[in-house]
Image (tube, coloured by chain):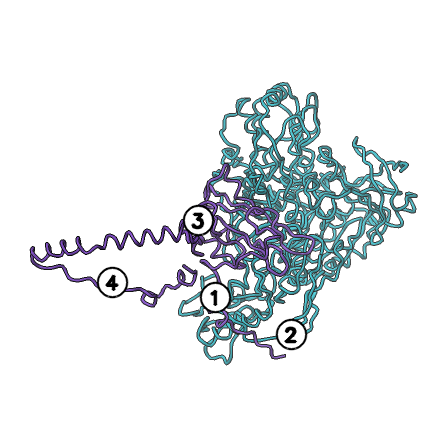
Chain colours: A cyan, B purple
Amino acid sequence: MTARKNKTKTITLTIDGKVCQTEYGKTILQVARANDIYIPTMCYLSKVEPIASCRMCVVDVEGVDGMILSCQEKATDGAVITTNNEAIFKQRQNIMKLYDVNHPLECGVCDKSGECDLQNKTMEFNVSQQDFTARDQHRPVENWGFISYDPALCIMCEKCVHVCNEVIGDEALAISAGGYNSTIINTKPAEDCSQCGECMAVCPVGALVSTDFKYSANAWELEKIPASCSHCSAACQMYYEVKTTSIEDPEPRIYRVTNNYEFSSLCGAGRFGFDFENRNVAKDPDAFARTLDAFRQAETIRFTASITNEEALIFQQFKEKSGVKLICEEARGYQQFMAAFSYVTGSSLYNSDLKKLSESRAAVVFGTRINDDAPMVKYHLTMASKHHQARIAYMHPIEDADIQNIVTQLMKYEAGSEEGVAALLAKTLLEGKEIPDTIRSYLNDLDVGNLSAESNLGEEEFDLLKKSLWKKSGFTLVAGADLYAHPQAENIARLLGLIERYSDFDVLLIPPATNALGVSLICDLDDEATGYTIGYNAEGDFVLSALGEGDLDMPALNQQEGTFTSLDKRVVPTHVALPYGGYVLNDIMSALGLKKRYTIDYTSSLPVEQGFRAIEFDALPDYFDITGEEHRGYLLSPFTVEKKLELKPVSALPTYDGIVLYQCNEGNQFSPFTQKTAQLKRDAKLRGSVQFSTVAKLKEGDRVKFTLHGVEYQRVFTIDTSMKGTVAINPAFDMGLSSASVSYYRFSQPKLERMDS
Amino acid sequence: MSLEQFKNRNVGTQAYKMIESEPTPPTGMGRFERVVKRTFKGELFVGLGVTMREMINALFKGEMHTIKYPMEKLPISPRYRAIHDMLRLLESGHYRCIGCGLCEKICISDCIRMDTRYDENQRKEVTEYTINFGRCIFCGYCAEVCPELAIVHGGRYETASEQRASFSLFEDMLTPIDALKQQKEFDGFGAVTPNADNAIKKTPLAY
């Protein structure tokens, strides 16, 4: 990671007699693992910098006195390395003996038993008795919200602290050092830590466990079902762990979610929001018959972008067959944005991805409340910040206290002025680059003074941004959902397209919903619904719903198999975790003439011309290899788009005076499906600053009513002292079927009506 | 017969008596003579006398040897594997089972199920526990694997019932709390070895 310059230099070394070739910069441990040579470790975690607290990974290097820590020592050309001999074994055995001192003998009840590194290594190094001693002390169990911490079981490997600081970026966990009294401490109260649960995922022992899961099942009883998280467009790798509900109820239930924590991460929604299945559904032939009738007379199908690629293809084929209109508000804006973007860049897809982002030297985040919209992207920004000292500019009308620690420059613009900001950003980033004259003159003709004044971003802020970039390379621009539904989205897209095409920046356009990218590639979407409308997890005259409140039940995404298209431009498979007794979309369509036996029979028919590949569902790989290379599904292949370089002059920037509401599902909430889960469920509140409360004349706890795009909201207002300005945050995850239609421009100025409580 | 005699597996140390019998006469005449001798010796009456003596002892002196099953039962070897018992801790009376799930895991006929939860005292509580005796093959692995000697095989070998469910619940197998004093420590397969005390090594306490 740190040796970029010598990247191409190949070196040869010998480990345990095996000749290994590698590029310079890899550690001995990495080389050994890549060559299938086993070196035991207790504290090593691939996705963070070497922790070097356990010292289990010691090896002998010929000609070097003493033992070398293979996790942090770089492999050198010609080195001859022995990973195991009597002295090393003795050393490792002694480490295990020390780890085992006073470790409570409660494996019988410990959640980790059966998958515990300490158990495994204690057996491996043949530690059967305690030779050392220390006075034990009282260490009470602590509860950190979804996570509980038992310091008595903690072996102080520090994986949790590193993952919290280097990957998640919460900086909540820290070490309270004190020799044998050392513990991990949570410096933030439970409500301020993002509750991602990554610390408990990486914990090699039972010290950090899920409060909800605790003592409810043993590791070996749970069946791991590989899946992709369905809550946001990152579609992270995960396993649903399933077992029978109880002795009386043999139906399976999801007990917890785990992931391949060595190479990927999960946010709290993925980890704790798993029980959103549509329960106890049986086939109802009458409702099915009514559904078929509804489809026969439907003029429009409205659906959310939280569907699989296969379902999207089914809708598209049904459209081709019967001529219905397809409405997906979430994906439509994104589709148009991508189209305008592609006309400028000449490629159907944006050119950055998560890996590139995590290795960036600088990043600009524009038009998205990143920590809530796409936590996975935020984690990669954190990695860039922590591992590559990346400078991160956060451009948004609301500052976010949760990402203060990684943001180096906050550029706060006025709500509604995104077009002007995009123009100024393009001007800044394209300065001194080779660009066509038309664009040069377009940028030169921009009324910078006016735009700066209207957007409230001064030239000096852009100068500062420019300055922070001048020395380095490897830049990423992350743009998000605020822009896709903006009235001037098309022009913004073109301006961002210019940035990707002509500047040193790679661009990542975060899809606004789980499969918005897939839907936008597969479906030919329409703009306006007319006539009789069928809603699929959305409002309509006839509703198919996985939330269990429609005219016909549908399976939720943990009851379906299929693929998602992630923001990493990857088509990833997900599998059935829980059985479903009712009808699925494919049953309806089979009855209407689209003859395929299973939904996944559509996987190989996904449109090749849009970058998909004709691969059967069952042939899709789903794993990370030992070096961390991702083999999940396949990558979309971008195709060339005919270039058109048209730029519209920046229109007069709208002004949002007074109070503004910002649509944002905060803190591990994404949709009604996360709200349906037992652990994440909570009351949606309108959250604003003290200033907002003064301007809006609202007190803490006041109930207000307002209408946004035809949907009525009732909210309790709460003051957040960490916020500033007159923009309040209004979530929509509790709005059931109508939350999907909330895909309009995220800033709005509804009339707040106070309700008597 | 006492349990100690059952448990003594060292053949040769028990008080066996060897019966000395004369060799069979080689000639036909010799064998004939032996038959005549035995016939007229009067041993028949010795045997009848013994029967008479035992009958009198049984009827008038209360030394009846017949076991009146099912009112009376013979003691059964602790190694016999009958319907399971769930034992309690002698001091607190709390059930011994910690809900570790090892019996469930090791069970080769997959007949043990348990539900557990995190209780108010921060302990793992067994909320429900059943053994399906329709499937149980009484192999004894559960008792052997149990780290707490909580599940053991009892001596209740009569497994006829109107329903098998009559045996299968935790409460049915658990020592009744008022019978705690009568609870016997399990001696069968998986029990602590007689020399366990000698095998224990003390944790060093240097502080």
Hey, what amino acid is under mark 2?
Arg
Dot 2: element: loop
Hey, what amino acid is under mark 3?
Phe
Q: Do labels 3 and 1 share a chain?
A: no
Question: Earlier along the polypeptide chain: callout 2 or callout 1?
Answer: 1
Q: Distance between the residues labelled 2 and 4?
A: 66 Å
Q: Mark 1 = which residue?
A: A124
* Residue B174 image position (x, y, % from top left): 57, 50
Q: Do labels 3 and 4 share a chain?
A: yes
Q: Mark 3 = which residue?
A: B138
Hey, what amino acid is under mark 4?
Ile
- Which picture quadrant has residue A644? top right
Q: Mark 2 = which residue?
A: A135
Hey, what amino acid is under mark 1?
Glu
Q: Are marks 1 and 4 on the same chain?
A: no
Q: Distance between the residues labelled 2 and 3?
A: 44 Å
Q: Mark 4 = which residue?
A: B19
Dot 1: element: helix
